[in-house]
Image: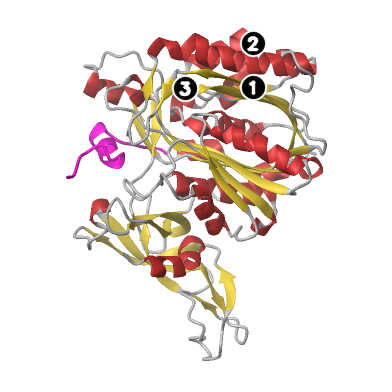
Amino acid sequence: MEIPRHWRLKKQRYGLVGEVCPHCDYKIFPPRDVCPNCGDEAKDLFTFSGKGQVYSFTTIYEAPTGYDSSAPYTVALVKLDEGPIITAQLTDVEGSSVEIGMPVEMVTRKMRDDGDERGILVYSYKFRPSLLVPQAHHPAG
Amino acid sequence: MPNNTLLKPTRPVGIIGYGAYVPRYRIPAREIARVWAGGKAALPVKEKAVPGLDEDVITMSIEAARNALARGQIQPSDLRAIWVGSESHPYAVKPTSTVVAEAIGAVPHVQAGDWEFACKAGTEAMVAAMGFVGSGMADYAMAIGMDTAQGKPGDALEYTAAAGGAAFIIGPAENSLATINCSYSYVTDTPDFWRREYQKYPEHGVRFTGEPAYFQHITSSSKTLMEELGTTAKDYQWAVFHQPNTKFPQRAAQMLGFTPEQIAPGLLVPVIGNTYSGASIIGLTAILDIAKPGDRILLASFGSGAGSDAFDITVTDKISVRAGLATKTQDYIARRIEIDYATYARYRGKITMK
């Protein structure tokens, strides 16, 4: 079991919380405290919008231990609207075709059990095809 | 009857934001009947919503909570309570509510807890939130009712036990999209439905679940609320009742004098099944999605064991903008992928792997 690691990573996993560089405004995910763009210190938290698009993808049929009960599943490189490209599972895509450039949005889903049915449940970000963008309606007249 | 039976806070309260969630998978009732009844069972619903392999009450509550925040236009750190009502919390011990609070960014200055009262745990949390805000202890509290309900394979409940629910932010009436004028709770010890510890599936009292349980409690709560307020069914634009199947809420509405048109927008059970702690309140979200300022709504939940919470709600002009700020309930329902019984059995963990 890896309880300390799951606990340490909860904010980035649950809510896509990364960092923004105070020197060059580069958006960083996962958070790493040193800006990969300018090399200066970056510790300001930044919550990503969760919107992005599929940069590339593949479907896993032979899953690693801990993920086998949900195989087959699709993993994608997702280019977030704010810049970074991250690796994540796609979800809610059964019965529909995944395409490069497809708009996706972050949802928090169950990733796996840590160990067996006695271990903690691990939740993390996944991406699904974007739902219809809600339209704000205004009072008539 | 004692004085002060109505639950009405001294500080007026209301719904600041609301959000629904329904997973996308559907199993038609006729598919369940095909497997267990030779295709010849009477079908209580058309189909029911089934959660995906990576969904549970925690993930579904997070999405509904995010929708409620989008409509409420407040910061997660403004919330002083996150309460989740369910009878399918993923853990026996470890709160659903702390994970939800962490995921939406409401930690750490927040009260959190999980509620259970069969199908009315969500409205129980709403009443508590009314008190929390109405007493002035807090400005904003979130109450969620969400379930991934269990039904024993082949049992009558398997046709309806579904997944979904809703989240509500309760706050001061002046910032509300709908004011909650008051509520009333009617509770007795009635053994109509239960699940013992360590049991996977619930038991029920078959026909006993009707008259002495559902109808007695839901009509008593609604009648008392209306009598105390001096209202009748005609004073309400809309009504929504707990919906374990299609017939029960239709009959309860008729007994109380409501027309089929008044309950139509909130009657979701035919197409998503019985979402237990979410059932009456997700109906309320579908009504709020189409409601107009000034509309008056009667909401009555029912929880086995047994009890019913009835609410008198008035929509304000803030609904016009806020209803459109998150995905609407009917849009979630329209996002539909039909599955067969084998896929359903896999998704719901009904296949023994060891």
Crowd band around label 2 with a 10 angstrom C-alpha radius: few (<14), some (14–19), many (20+): some
Crowd band around label 1 with a 10 angstrom C-alpha radius: few (<14), some (14–19), many (20+): many
Residue B339 in the magenta stretch? The answer is yes
* Stretch in magenta: B336-354
> What residue is disc 2 on?
B256
- Horizontal and vertical percent for residue B354? 17, 45
Left or right placement of residue B138 versus residue B10 in this view: left
Measure the alpha-carbon separation of dots 1 and 2: 10 Å
- Horizontal and vertical percent for residue B195? 39, 29
Which chain hosts label 1?
B
Residue in front for this viewpoint, A97 or B163 = B163
Q: How many dots with numbers?
A: 3
The amino acid pointed to by label 1 is: Ala
- As helix, strand or loop, the secondary structure at mark 2 comes to helix
Question: Of circles 1 and 2, which is in front?
Answer: 2
Residue B239 disc label: 1
Residue B244 disc label: 3
Q: Quadrant of residue A44?
A: bottom right
**Residue B41 seen:** yes
